[in-house]
């Protein structure tokens, strides 16, 4: 069988993203398959899987599995068309011989029968807006995920929550595990359709079909965490607030409000930030400065940022007036 080396390298680079550096053969290998009369299919992954088709010249079926990093290293040295052939335990690329892998590999899954359109640009923007808030603690599967629901995209690690602005992305309600989020984001670029089929999500493009296993852990009831009303709203110049928070050190900051300003302090460092509008009397609240900095970084372009509060132990919401996107931070208990 003959195939273009650059096309095969591109497909293998995509497939490598779905493999692991170590593990069982099914986790580390790229599988090459061709049925009689069909294109070459390059596949990888188990829970999350990709299959890319490549035009080839062949007169017989073909099947081989090889370590992802090994075949990519070999293909980088080749150009033009490459001849592929196999014998027991070996895959030949022109004069280069690679060890092939024996194993029981998943069958390639065809694209879902009914695919819906997706607004990829909006979906990617939503993912980028909230991904920072996903939990990295694998012992909490309900939170190591991203929730897509009713046009919103939501992520939380239990100490903070980010909700995107509502948008008609055409993504169905689903919960995607953290490991699949960057793969899904990448698959959206150039996507031609999307559908949820049972416990899996299918995303197609011109040459590739991606399947992602959805999370079966119920995402927490995030709407119950978001306050519906606020008793205090402080408004800051966005640039001034960001620059002041960036100077804070330590894992705890105290925000003390007067009618016209806020003093933010942490580990002996204090910054005074003027308010753009008076705020009703409020004593103080303690927040993790790193969480606040993350929220401000992802809140989007705005001249004024609102800080919405109730009591000193109630969630604090950072937002922009007129947008339903929010970045929520849970307060910390002040030391007596």
Image (tube, grey):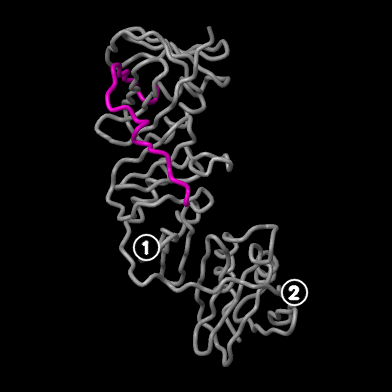
Query: What residue did someone put label 2 on?
Result: 99
Q: Quadrant of residue 222?
A: top left
Q: Is residue 39 left or right of residue 325?
A: right
Judged from the image, the secondary structure of the residue bearing numbered disc 2 is strand
Alpha-carbon span between mark 1 and mark 2: 36 Å
**Residue sitting farthest toward the bottom:** 59
Residue at the (37%, 63%) spot, across then down? 194
- What are the residue bounds of the magenta stretch? 216-240
Q: Which image quarter is the N terminus in? A: bottom right
Judged from the image, the secondary structure of the residue bearing numbered disc 1 is strand
Q: Which mark is residue 194?
A: 1
| Mark in front: 1 vs 2 | 1
Q: Position of residue 184 (x, y in %)?
A: 46, 56
286 or 266: nearer the viewer? 286
Reply above or below: 181 against 195: above
Q: Give the mark nearer the N terminus: 1 vs 2.
A: 2
Q: Is residue 144 left or right of residue 113?
A: right
């Amino acid at each position: 069988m003959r195939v273009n080396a650059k096309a095969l390298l591109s497909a293998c680079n995509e497939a490598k993203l779905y493999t692991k550096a170590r593990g069982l053969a099914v986790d580390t290998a790229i599988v090459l398959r061709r049925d009689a009369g069909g294109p070459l299919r390059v596949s990888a992954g188990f829970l999350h899987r990709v299959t890319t088709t490549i035009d080839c010249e062949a007169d017989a079926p073909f099947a081989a599995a090889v370590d992802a990093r090994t075949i990519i290293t070999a293909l980088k040295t080749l150009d033009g068309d490459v001849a592929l052939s196999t014998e027991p335990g070996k895959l030949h690329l022109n004069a280069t011989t690679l060890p092939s892998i024996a194993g029981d590999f998943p069958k390639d899954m065809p694209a879902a029968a009914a695919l819906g359109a997706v607004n990829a640009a909006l979906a990617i923007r939503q993912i980028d807006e909230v991904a920072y808030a996903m939990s990295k603690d694998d012992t909490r599967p309900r939170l190591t995920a991203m929730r897509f629901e009713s046009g919103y995209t939501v992520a939380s690690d239990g100490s903070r929550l980010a909700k995107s602005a509502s948008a008609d992305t055409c993504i169905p309600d689903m919960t995607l595990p953290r490991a699949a989020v960057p793969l899904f984001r990448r698959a959206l670029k150039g996507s031609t359709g999307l559908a949820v089929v049972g416990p899996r999500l299918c995303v197609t493009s011109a040459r590739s079909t991606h399947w992602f296993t959805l999370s079966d852990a119920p995402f927490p009831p995030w709407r119950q965490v978001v306050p519906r009303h606020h008793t205090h709203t402080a408004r800051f110049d966005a640039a001034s607030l960001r620059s002041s928070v960036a100077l804070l050190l330590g894992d705890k900051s105290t925000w003390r409000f007067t009618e016209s300003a806020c003093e933010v302090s942490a580990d002996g460092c204090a910054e005074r930030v003027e308010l753009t509008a008076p705020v009703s009397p409020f004593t103080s609240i303690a927040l993790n400065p790193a969480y606040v900095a993350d929220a401000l970084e992802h809140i989007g372009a705005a001249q004024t940022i609102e800080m919405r509060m109730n009591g000193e132990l109630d969630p604090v919401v950072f937002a922009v007036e007129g947008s339903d996107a929010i970045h929520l931070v849970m307060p910390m208990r002040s030391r007596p």
